Amino acid sequence: MTGLLITLVSLFFVLFCAYLNADIFTLLYKGEVVDGVVTRKWVDSPPPDKRGWSSNYIGYTFKVEDQVWKGKSSVWGWIYSWRDEGDEVSVIYDPAKPAINHYGSRWGVLVSSIGWVIVFVFLGLIGILGLRVAVMPPEDQ
C-alpha cells in the first residue's frame, strides 16, 4: 500500500510540474528558432530585508512574418555577462503563438530549465520505485 501511495504522489507531482512548464515542452517540440536582438539587461534582486536569489534577465526582440515581438528570459549569470544590448541572439518561439518564446535554441531552453528536468527524473524514479514496492509479493518469513 505504501508503494502505491508513493507512486500516486510522485505521479501527481510529475503531472503538476509538466502543467507548470507546458510552454517549455511546446518550445522543445514545436519551436522555431529565429534571430533576435538584445534590447535590455537587468537583475531582479530581492528587497534588502528579504532573503532570496537574484535573477538575471535579458530582454530581446525578434521578427515573425514582418511583425516584431518582444520577449524576456531569465538566464544564467555567465550568459548575462556575455551578452550586451544590441547583440544578435537566437530566439525560439511557438509558431502558433509567438508570445511564447525564450532566449536561445532548443538546447538553451533545455539548459535553462535543467532544474525541472532533474525534478521530473527524480520524481519518475521515486514513482518507479514505489510501483515496484507496491507490486512485489511479500517475502515469506
Image (cartoon, rainbow, N blue to C red):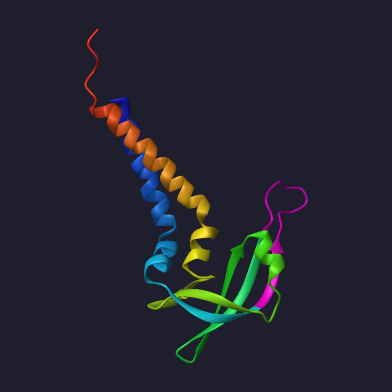
| Residue 124 location (% of width, % of height) | 37, 42
**From the image, which quarter does the N terminus lie in?**
top left
- Which residue is outermost to the right? 48
In front here: 19 or 118?
118
In front here: 48 or 68?
68
Residue 4 shows in the view? no
- Which residue is outermost to the top? 141
Residue 137 shows in the view? yes
Q: Is residue 54 left or right of residue 135?
A: right
Say which residue appears at 36% left-offset and 44% top-offset. Answer: 12
Say which residue appears at 68% left-offset and 72% top-offset. Answer: 83
Q: Which residues are magenta?
A: 39-55
| Quarter location, residue 136 | top left
| Residue 54 location (% of width, % of height) | 69, 55
| Residue 88 location (% of width, % of height) | 62, 80
| Residue 84 location (% of width, % of height) | 71, 75
Say which residue appears at 41% left-offset and 41% top-offset. Answer: 123
Asked whether 92 falls inside the magenta stretch, the response is no
- Which residue is outermost to the bottom? 66
Asked whether 44 falls inside the magenta stretch, the response is yes
Number of marks in the rendered image:
0
